[in-house]
Amino acid sequence: MNDADVSKQIQQMVRFIRQEAEEKANEISISAEEEFNIERLQLLESAKRKLRQDYDRKLKQVDIRKRIDYSTQLNASRIKYLQAQDDVVTAMKDSAAKDLLRVSNDKNNYKKLLKSLIIESLLRLKEPSVLLRCREMDKKVVESVIEDAKRQYAEKAKVGSPKITIDEKVFLPPPPNPKLPDSHDPHCSGGVVLASQDGKIVCENTLDARLDVAFRQKLPQVRSFRLGMFFFSLHSQSLPLTLLLISADPDAPRWSS
């Protein structure tokens, strides 16, 4: 083999190696580009997923904050409404209590009322001997009706006439002093308190006690009214309400044993 043939073979080998190298390099380039595209897509999807998660989380936080703010405002409104209701109910009771002070001014009707309260208390206690307390200013009126009250009780209960002892040492508090409207001293608008001789059973049948009982019993109905009805009641219905509270009702006296 001469030099020309050797040179030709070498050239062919060089071209073959170069072609193999170029093809291999092309394959590597294509594979690298595919891997790059796959990695880029994965990173892109991961970034999108993270963004969506962050968005959902922040959206939930905003929704929770809205719910909290709404609940806070709603509770505040309810508290204001309930406070307004309580203020008006208290004002109603205060107005009725002021009306009670005028009940004893009508001497004839108050005398009948005291007798009814005594009979009512006797029917509650059903004791043969009781102790009666009243306001010092009502002592003479009570003494004037006590015998009639004993007789009527005996007829209704079909028992013997009870013994009623008026407490001469301890009297119920006097009515509040109009000159001291802010005074917190004990006071009584009228009525009586009867107790068994041993003091174990007490029937508090004062006008103030009846007012407290009536308000406790009627409070659900009172609260169901609109506030406008409350204010209307304050100005136009307090006297009828007072008359209702002091009417002779066997369930009204407050008593304990």
Image (cartoon, grey):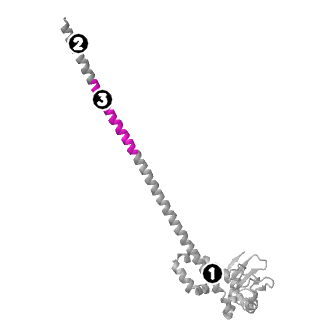
Q: Which residue is mark 3?
A: 29
What's the residue at 50%, 63% (across, down)?
71
- Dot 2 or dot 3, earlier in sequence: 2
As displayed, is residue 36 above or below residue 85? above
How far apart are labels 2 and 1 at the CA level?
A: 124 Å
Crowd tier of the residue under label 3, counting other residues whose Cα lies within 10 Å: few below 14, some 14–19, many 20 or above? few
Q: Give the label, 1 or 3, closer to the camera.
A: 3
Q: How many marks?
A: 3
Q: Which residue is mark 1?
A: 94
Q: Is residue 129 visible?
A: no
- Dot 2 or dot 1, earlier in sequence: 2
For the record, the magenta segment spans 23-49
24 to the left or right of 128: left
**Residue 87, image x and y in percent?**
58, 76
**Going by the picture, which residue comes out furthest to the top?**
1
How far apart are labels 1 and 3 at the CA level?
A: 96 Å
The answer to which quarter of the image holds residue 121 is bottom right
Q: Give the label, 2 or 3, closer to the camera.
A: 2
